[in-house]
Image (tube, grey):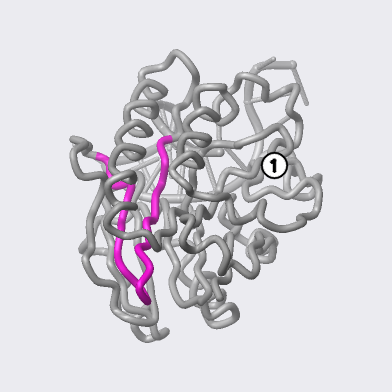
Amino acid sequence: MKLATWNVNSLSVRLPQLLDWLAQQQPDALVLQETKLTDDKFPVAALEEAGYRCAWFGQKTYNGVALLARETPTQIVCNIPGLEDPQARVITGTVGGIRVVGAYFPNGQAPESEKFAYKMRWLEALQSWLRTELAQHPRLVLMGDFNIAPEDRDVHDPVAWAGQIHCTPEERAHFQALAALGLHDAFRLFEQPPRSWSWWDYRNLAFRKNQGLRIDHILVSEALRAGVTACGIDKAPRRNERPSDHAPVLVELG
DNA sequence: ATGGCCCGGCTTCCGGGA
């Protein structure tokens, strides 16, 4: 079973690229972030034509998430139960006996900002909800744009980024708290090329210079860990003419 | 050189992203 996550930074703009990519990679399930579409504008017809059943949860201008799968996802839940949140950031469904959680974690803007405080509240709520969700669904994958670079080796310039958003000790502690729930970073279960990133700034020729961050992740539960056979970042879509600033991350489960 | 790019939107600039 092949699962993937991709922050498309506007599904309207990226739909042709997504359809190409689905045809090439043929994942069994895919979660999207930053669709930036209200639910009435979701391109369900084009995606069904491509062979995918969809669940989606969006809003105007910002955020927005979706779950696409070969088979119809069931038991759909939007956002984090128990957290009052006007922002559309999480969609969860069951596909092939696996509980798939697709999430667009808050950016946080800057430490000390109100948006950072929201990120911390959101992370607390996610952790608390996942604890109960894992008890009900031991076979669980959490994937998406975490907006957290877990370690210095996930940052192109750790000195420049030290203490900056995505790299603060508070954010990294939350990532470790997810690990403590038995959610394993699938990417690090395998030998990986050094300087592997999932996001490159649009500015500064960052992609050409390979200056980026690894902030998009796939975490697999303890019950799934032994069955993971591969995990990697597909840089190819970042070379497209009008790319998202994020690349997709893929995982293979035996 | 503390900004460079890209997105949506009550669009010709602005806020947000990361």
The vertical placement of A137 against A182, above or below, is below
Q: Give residue A158's quadrant in the image.
A: top right
Looking at the rendered structure, the kind of residue marked 1 is Gly
Q: Where does residue A58 sit, x and y in percent of width and height?
A: 27, 54
x 61%, y 19%: residue: A163
Q: Is residue A133 magenta?
A: no
x 64%, y 55%: residue: A187
x 66%, y 62%: residue: A232
Magenta stretch: dominant SS? Answer: strand
Q: Where does residue A36 sit, x and y in percent of width and height?
A: 35, 52
Residue stretch rendered in magenta on the structure: A87-106
Picture quarter with the C terminus of chain A: bottom right
x 23%, y 53%: residue: A78
**Residue A206 appears left or right of A129:** right
Q: Where does residue A111 sit, x and y in percent of width and height?
A: 49, 17
* Residue nearest the viewer, comparing A232 with A243: A232
Number of labels in the image equals 1
- Label 1 secondary element: strand
Q: Residues within 10 Å of mark 1 (few under 14, many from 20)?
A: many
The subunit carrying tag 1 is: A
Q: Is residue A105 magenta?
A: yes
Taking the view exactly as shown, the residue that stands out farthest to the top is A112
**Residue A6 appears left or right of B16:** right
The vertical placement of A94 against A77, above or below, is below
Q: Where does residue A210 sit, x and y in percent of width and height?
A: 78, 46
Residue under label 1: A212
